[in-house]
Image: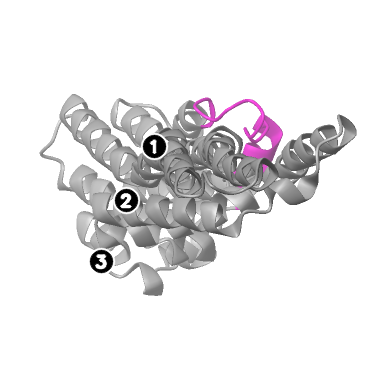
Amino acid sequence: MTIMIGLVVVFGCLLGGFAAMGGHLDVLVQPWEYFIIGGVAIGTFIVANPMATIKDTGKAIIEAFKNKVPKGDAYLDIIGLLFLIMQEMRSKTRAEMEAHIDDPESSAIFSGYPSILKDAEMLNFIADYVRLIILGNARPHEIEALMEEEIHTISRDKLKPYQAVQAVADGLPAIGIVAAVLGVIKAMGSLDKPPEYLGAMIGAALVGTFAGILMSYGLAGPIATSIKVVREKQNRRYVVVKQTLIAFMNGATPHLAVEYGRKTVSSKDRPTLEMVEEQMLNAPIPMAAE
């Protein structure tokens, strides 16, 4: 929603200001200039990126427009699930815990958190490190280093759409100049025409430079930044898992360990301590133990 509001402000002020100072809006209607700029930008984007990144970029743009970032409930689900798992690890055998980890869909622990079950990446992340913990062979600092490396890899992959869109934004001014040069070349071939006709052609050519700069700094660049913000907030969930499990491995109780994880959440999105305590009190521990 904020992206749409911003774009309305950008184009409203741009076109309104141009019209207010006596400009004719019809001069800006140069479809072939926009076609050249847009086509070249899309083509270079396809050349520069593998198909997986192209598909993920489409997904990332939709997420940015919807501002699809984790809210308080998403963090509460992660904290609640980790609390249950840590409680069970303190009282259950390795074989009993492996049954939950190997088949999360049938687990009494995981079944209470359908949002995590639907998120395959987060589910695998939690399951993998809980499995390492119950094996009992790795030390906390070793698992922490491994988690940090994986989080870095996840972040790098998730930010590829941002880098791809930003690369297009960086190139759009130059692409606009290319479109303008083509327009000038066309105008040079009509030097025998009347001045008013020639002036209109040169004006149309200059629209290419205008459009390239506008599309770069007023459209593609801001969208790239929005993608980065959304993806970085999504990746924060993995840090919550890491801090919680490492605190537990270092001897913290489940109640204290989840507080380590909660503190890594931005203050604007962080669940309150009362909300976390209510989540832990309502955790179906007896059901999970059956």
Packing grade of label 3 (10 A; few <14, some 14-19, many >=20) is few
Q: Residue furthest right?
A: 20
Q: Is residue 254 above or below residue 106?
A: above
> Quick check: is 278 in the magenta stretch?
yes
Q: Is residue 201 above or below residue 10?
A: below
Q: Position of residue 231 (x, y in %)?
A: 46, 42
Labels 2 & 1 near each other (Cβ < 8 A)? yes
Q: Determine the CA span between mark 2 and mark 3.
A: 44 Å
Question: For numbered disc 1, what is the local secondary structure?
Answer: helix
Where does residue 263 sit, x and y in percent of width and height?
Answer: 53, 25
- For marks 2 and 3, the one nearer the N-term is 2
Q: Residue at x 49, y 46 (%)?
A: 183
The amino acid sitting under disc 1 is Gly
Residue highlighted by disc 2:
44
Q: Which amino acid, by three-letter code, is at mark 2?
A: Thr
Quarter residue 11 falls in: top right
